[in-house]
Image (tube, rainbow, N blue to C red):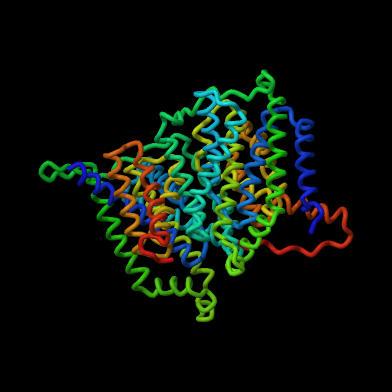
Amino acid sequence: MIYLFQVLNGIGLGMLYFLLAVGLSVIFGLLQFVNFAHGAFYLLGAYLTYDLTMRGFSFWAAMPLATLIVAGLAALIEAVLLHRIYKLPHTFHILVTVGLALVVQELVIIAWGPLGGSVPAPEGLQGVVILGDFIYPQYRLFTIGFTAVLAGLLWWLLEGTRLGAIVRGGSESPANMALLGYNTLRINTAVFGFGAGLAGLAGALAAPIRGVEPFMGIEALSVAFVVVVIGGMGSYTGALVAGLLVGVVQSVMTTLWPEGARLMIYVGMALVIALMPRGLLGRA
Amino acid sequence: MNPLDKPYAQLALALLTVLVLPLFLKSGILATEILIFAMVVAACNLLLGYTGLLSFGQGIFFGIGTYVAGICLTRWQVPVPLVLAGAAVLGAATATLVGWLSIRRQGVYFVMLTLAFSQLFYFVAYTFSGVTGGDNGLLGVPRPSVGGTALNAPWSYYTFVAICFVAVFAVLVMVTQSTFGRTLLAIRENEGRAAAIGFPTRLFKIEAFAISGAVTAFGGALHAMLIGVAPLSNIEYHTSELILIMTIIGGSSSLFGSVLGAGFYLLLADALSTVWPRWLLLLGLVLVTVALFLQRGLWGLVERGYDLVFRRERAPETPAEEH
């Protein structure tokens, strides 16, 4: 029974990792840009949710609002700063986004202090679900359902709509898209905002589960990297499979070996890379 | 080529740094820290500037050196030369493993892997707190002693570290000047072509990792003896980030640039962190500025200054390096 509990936890956690990884992946696919500030957007999404609920907003208002603010801010940063450095080598993408992540982290500490805090589960989902002798928190069940719906929407958006086609076309050949009359600069800005917004949303959803603290960004960034490395960048299915796998491994290990649970994520990654250098699905 | 980039000029500048630091700095601890990080950053530069590998995992090797010193000196009283040699060997071994796994993927995947490995080793140190002291670290790491007296005065330990620094820096200059170093440059410029000529490029990259790891762990051991602790923070993501930032700020086209990068960062940190605990905010802005306006780093600035003063006609601008 404890394993069922932990597997469910793992699926919830894994879906959040999936959201993070897809955001990173979409940005990299279109812009060939490595976003080391991705964890900072996750951090910001969590803290904005924390702040808004503290101010008396309902979680149901705070979560979308935080996501939109993060997306808007990221789009602004892209339009003002990042589009200037796309042509530079990757080293400078990393330098700038590491710098941005530091700025965001320090601003968070200035605004909300170094200690962090907790976000209560939203009204209506504070109880538990009881099925026989199995008890599970309602909010965690909600995140699983909600992120599953989101994942479906994302798949449809990226694979089934004109918007998705534009994004994929842009990652194939920006020059051709410009020739066809698309404003690639505006598409870039929108996609960057979208990807960062997914990180912000993951942060907002994670806040009631794990609370907020200023260093949760780097943790999220490295987990997103693990997911992308083993699932393949630019692969929707890869991100989903790898995200869920990482989440379930982490949760199940929490029961078997609590101190080593997070270590096992990285050991698992090292094993995958040693045995299957191209990642789980063998793409990229 | 700028005369300052010649190997003897680089070595002379390193010697000059060792002699000049005591004249300008009051704190022997700060001066020692600059030299330790200078060699660690130069080792990172061997990967970034000379092999084209951006490693986000240098903190792993630094931390390993720190723990070798911490464990050997507080539990078993191993002689210091053996400790330093052991740190270098274990650093090289770990770097070989991390390098071997990471270079299975290229480009950004490689960078992401090195970052993930730095998290892996952090959690190893965090989880096995019986060995590493966990969050508290290992306390009471003694300074080395020469001729029966411990080098407890800051400036006497500085002399010890300075000798190590000059030796390590000379070795790194020799490595970059050797056929091996030239081959690394060829791999950075065009890996496909280097492989087509018949060089085993993966082996060369792993060897570069091993050298870099050995030097970094050596520096980590010296650092533990400097501050008297082997802290968990030396193996954290933050240390890897720091070493990389210093390397890029200093400029990746010359080894002495790394000395500048380490000095710049540590002096800035020393001046600002007491005034304003949130000074990392400013560092973030510095990084953005460097990427936009100073892509060849502080060393690029030095080269431009030299050309302005000593050469009448300006040398043509070298284009930014491709990675």
- Frontmost residue, A60 versus B166: B166
- Residue A32: x %, y % from top left: 51, 65
How far from the left and from the top, in percent, is residue B298? 72, 49
Horizontal side of residue B212 vs A162, given as left or right: right
**Considering depth in this image, is A92 or B52 the residue closer to the camera?**
B52
Residue A198 can be seen in this image: no
From the viewer's perspective, tell me whether residue A129 is left or right of residue A193.
Answer: left
The percent position of residue B268, horizontal first and vertical second, equals 67, 39
Q: Quadrant of the N terminus of chain B?
A: bottom right
Residue at (58, 23) in percent of width and height: B142
Q: Nearer the viewer, residue A216 or B22?
A: B22
Q: Residue at x 77, y 32 (%)?
A: B24
The residue located at (79%, 35%) in the rendering is B20
Q: Please, is residue A225 above or below residue B267 in the view?
A: below
Residue lying at the far bottom in this picture: please name it: A180
| Residue at x-position 68% and y-position 41% | B168
- The spot of residue A208 in percent (x, y) is 32, 43
